[in-house]
Amino acid sequence: MAAMLTDPSNLLSAFVALVVFATIITLAAPAMTSNGLESRLKSVANRREELRRRSRAAMAQKGGTNSGSSLRHTDDGVYKTIVDRLQLSRLLEDPKVVDKLAQAGFRGPKPVSTFYFFRFVMPFAFALLAAIYVYGINDFGLQGMQKLALCVGGLTIGYYAPNVYIQNVAQKRRESIVSAFPDALDLLLICVESGMSIEAAIQKVGAEVGSSSMELAEELSLLTAELSYLPDRRLAYEGLARRTNHPGIKSVATAMIQAERYGTPLGTALRVMAKENRELRLSAAEKKAASLPPKLTVPMIVFFLPVLFVVILGPAFIKISDMMAKKPVG
């Protein structure tokens, strides 16, 4: 088994098969991709229903009646049981884990339990895989301490792997939201100036912007639900800023809070915020364009210059070799 796995021809065949499989998946991905807008809006509808039930429960408690049972979503899965028994939430405590998961689009108690479970399991899984490979399959000629250091490196990578995954998902989600947010502000400004209420305007914009950014449509639908059922509208705007974690959206949330509190014209604030967010998007694009030449330096040196030297100097070398071959000896 070890000889078969370490055979160069088998490794090359596996690499070629992997490349072919990746090519097929890349070409077929657009046809197999499904629109997840309906599922996202369904989750937002569940959140709206939860807020509605919680609001009714609060009204019932004020009226002196008993609600009878808890209205919060609970997690009774296997991950939750393991986390509670091993007290992983205390052992691997992260005070910002709820905000990080919300920024990645995971809400509720179940993703928290899943995160703690995989943060506990992944280090041992990576260390075990590294140990199996270096001690049983191919040791690469490493000494004992080097093998142990490789296993410890796998342990470290496994510990930080869940955080890296959450950060990547949150970053992609934030980029999708930010790319469509200035246009959504323009639509929101038009709706507000036409006489619509802020809740109806946000709901309308969320329905229209779903084709360009499902994540932004989800956040706007959730904002509409929280504006309807949270006791303080300020909490809804702060929740939007916390879930997106972008300075432009935070400034918009602050402006809308001030407009609610002091009665300032909301249309003027939205017009200014739309312009600022559009400038932020333009500056981000300019920053990426400015960072492109340094990133292209290494590929130019490694891939382009050798080919250029071969194309320019190749004919000269061939001509010199022909002349040296035809030159009479003596």
Image: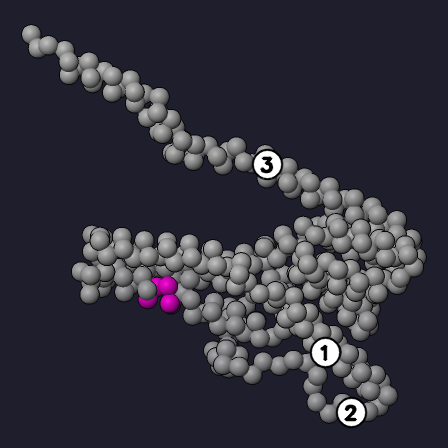
Element type at mark 2: loop
Q: Is label 1 or label 3 in front?
A: 3
- Read off the residue under disc 2: 66
Up/down of 291 relative to 186, above or below:
above
Residue situated in front as seen by the camera: 222 or 201: 201
Q: Residue at x 53, y 61 (%)?
A: 31
* Label 1 crowd bin: few (<14), some (14–19), many (20+), radius 10 Å: some
Residue 153 sits in which quadrant? bottom left
Find residue 267 and report its horizontal and vertical position in percent: 88, 52
Query: Is there any visible trace of residue 238 in the rendered image?
Result: no
Element type at mark 3: helix
Residue 239 sits in which quadrant? bottom right
Up/down of 25 relative to 327, above or below:
below
Find residue 181 and report its horizontal and vertical position in percent: 72, 52
- Give the label on residue 209, or none: none
* Residue stretch in magenta: 124-128
Q: Residue at x 76, y 54 (%)?
A: 184
- Read off the residue under disc 3: 289
